[in-house]
Image: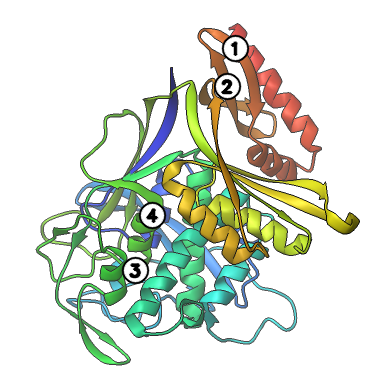
Amino acid sequence: MSEMERVLYFDCFSGVAGDMTLGALIDLGLDPDELVLALRSLELNADWSLTVERVHKMGIVGCKVRILVEGEEEGAAEPVGAPIPGLVSLRAVSRPATHAFALKPAQAHRHGPGHGHRHGYRAAEILKIIDDAVALPLPVRIRARQAFSALAQAEAEVHGVAAAEVHFHEVGAIDSILDIVGSAWGIWRLGVDVLESAPPPLGRGFFRTEHGRMPGPAPATLKLLEGLPITAAGLDRELVTPTGAAFLKAWCTRIGDLPDLVLERVGFGAGNADFPDRPNLLRLLLGRRRVAVSPDEELWVIEVNLDDLSPEIGGYVLERLLEAGARDAWFTPLYMKKNRPGFLVSALVDEARRSEIESVLLRESTAIGLRRHRVTRTVLERRMETVSTPYGDVRVKVALDGEALRNVAPEFEDCAARAREAGVALKEVYRQAIVSFSSKVSQ
């Protein structure tokens, strides 16, 4: 038994950065207007604008993204020809001048009264901004949280502070929030199941910080890449930014050679500088492959009965369980001793994630103990297909038993997004997706 999965491969021959990733995703077909609309759900405290431009690098066309925050661009003060771009603050997640971009007219976003002040963000505040953006699909918030958590942890270890207290100055913070959340949204919107990457090439040299000259790559970048294969670029440039390294650390399941794929599309995201020996581009390869799935799979169910868990905290616990890799997580209402209403909190996990899931439950909930038992599940062959509806494209999950079609389920997050955009009922988008798939099958 097998199923198809969609793979995104970072072919990062000139490095990887947040803006280059966004540009490459747009070049793969991500709609910039949809991207900006999604990012507007973030409660940020300053005007920002995002623009896209197509440029040539050694004869190859790629998409160049630029983000301005209150008219400023992160790292823009550094001359493009600087051997290694400076970081505005050692604590900041900075976009190097290597990847600065030209401006084109774009819409800006500003909140109402009370949001005109300017300050930085602590890592804990950024994670709350992501959590509070409930208009974003849950998989997007989970993926964005993974990257920012990895980034904050790396900065914390480098600077000897608690991860929640890592401070990002305003331009760098908003710039990085938009890069990370935008990339997470683009990966979800393109229906990616698995991310992999080539070994990232690292440059050398020195860069300037508020604490003096530092050797490249940035300390946080190297901390993030610990345990991952790397390669020497042979350039005195910062090629892999902390944000780019966070993508590889938090999102990629494998770092290595190009996988076997049926290639669907190729996208290029451009940096600003010109290198003597290579085009300054990030190449993303989007493809699909068939993977074997055992019809019978052994997993664990981790569970606990709780009668003192706030429902608000409970919702947060479920998100953290899914973020930590649970296959599924759910609540079951219970009546417990002394007639107290409570919850059975359950998580379905594989062996590799069992310890991590147990740690999340003990840390985030009011549990003082857990139960676990093995279960065996039978799964049908599944594949994802995209159908066109009057409201836009929607992915549907198709379940097969041999050659027999057993179920067709439109993806909720896709349908919800199309319903909001078109101002129609969610059930209408569902209906149109089923109709479109049925028509496709009958042709």
Alpha-carbon span between mark 3 and mark 2: 38 Å
Element marked by disc 1: strand
Labelled disc at residue 21: 4
Q: Quadrant of residue 209?
A: bottom left
- Dot 3 surroundings within 10 Å: few (below 14), some, or many (20 or more)? many
Answer whether labels 1 and 3 touch (C-beta < 8 Å).
Answer: no
Mark 1 neighbour density, 10 Å: few (under 14) some (14–19) many (20 or more):
few
Please tell me whether mark 1 or mark 3 is closer to you in this view: 1
Q: What is the basis of the colouring in this image?
A: rainbow
In the image, residue 87 sits, relative to residue 151, either above or below, namely below
Q: Amino acid at mark 3?
A: Pro
Q: Are marks 2 and 1 in contact (CB under 8 Å)?
A: yes
Reading the chain from its start, which is encountered first: label 1 or label 3?
3
Distance from the alpha carbon under mark 1 to that under mark 4: 37 Å
Distance, label 2 to label 4, CA atoms, is: 30 Å
Type of amino acid under label 1: Leu
Mark linked to residue 242: 3
Tell me the crowding category of disc 4: few under 14, some 14 to 19, or many 20 or more residues within 10 angstroms, Cα based.
many
Which is nearer the eye, 328 or 111? 328
Q: Is residue 418 visible?
A: yes
Q: Which quarter of the picture shows residue 287?
A: top left
Mark found first going from the N terminus, 2 or 1 = 2
For residue 135, side relative to residue 232 (left or right) = right
